[in-house]
Image: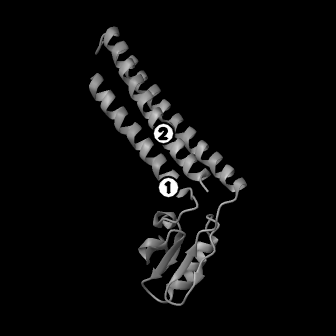
Amino acid sequence: MISEIKKTTEQKMNKSVEALKLDLAKVRTGRAHTGLLDHVMVEYYGSMVPVNQVANVTLIDSRTIGVQAWEKPMLAKVEKAIRDSDLGLNPANMGEIIRVPMPALTEERRRDLTKVVRTEGESAKIAVRNLRRDANQQLKDAVKEKLISEDDERRGEDEIQKLTDRHVGEIDKLLAQKEQELMQI
């Protein structure tokens, strides 16, 4: 019973950490990476799809992303979608390929992005703590139903707390890495 609660809680906490990793990958640094355009949606025959489903996204150099549409008419739509996204990018259509240069980040913009990263991290920590609360509640319910003893409940709570501490530490480490990455010039 306790191991089952612990296992499901750990899986959910791992998902929270993975979701944070995905969110942090979307926050751009001075360097270009293809994952930056993953959430940019483009209209393709009446439905909205990610850019990487209508075009080949590659790195031209460390500060430039290349986007080559699979169909010629899609070039203009892809360019417009990138320009209209919240990334602050200015793509240039070169005929066959769209070049997306990554502008250097100003000090003020870096600080703003650091605040965004901290907010994302705090949300992930809150999610992990909520999972701990839910698991502890399940243990309390199991004691009420006389499925486990109070000693087992205490041991279970300790194990859940260790899981929580480990995941919060992992989140802190991810945040520190991203903040350091953002503040690099």
Front one among 168 and 181: 181
Give coordinates of residue 8: x percent, y percent: 33, 34
Q: Is residue 133 above or below residue 55?
A: above
* Kind of residue sitting beneath label 1: Ala
Identify the mark at residue 89; answer none if there is no mark.
Answer: none
Q: Which residue is mark 1?
A: 25
- Label 2 element class: helix
Image position of 53 (left or right of 3): right
Q: Is residue 3 above or below residue 13?
A: above
Front one among 163 and 49: 163
Q: Is residue 3 above or below residue 48?
A: above
**On-image quarter of the N terminus:** top left
**Crowd tier of the residue under label 2, counting other residues whose Cα lies within 10 Å: few below 14, some 14–19, many 20 or above:** few
- Label 1 element class: helix
Identify the mark at residue 173; answer none if there is no mark.
Answer: 2
Image position of 3 (left or right of 56): left
**Which image quadrant for residue 4?**
top left
Which residue is pictured at 35% across the width and 9% down the height? Answer: 150
Front one among 185 and 22: 185
Q: How many marks?
A: 2
Which residue is pictured at 52% across the width and 51% down the height? Answer: 24
**On-image quarter of the C terminus:** bottom right
**Crowd tier of the residue under label 1, counting other residues whose Cα lies within 10 Å: few below 14, some 14–19, many 20 or above:** some
- Residue occupying the far right of the picture: 108
Which residue is pictured at 42% across the width and 73% down the height? Answer: 53
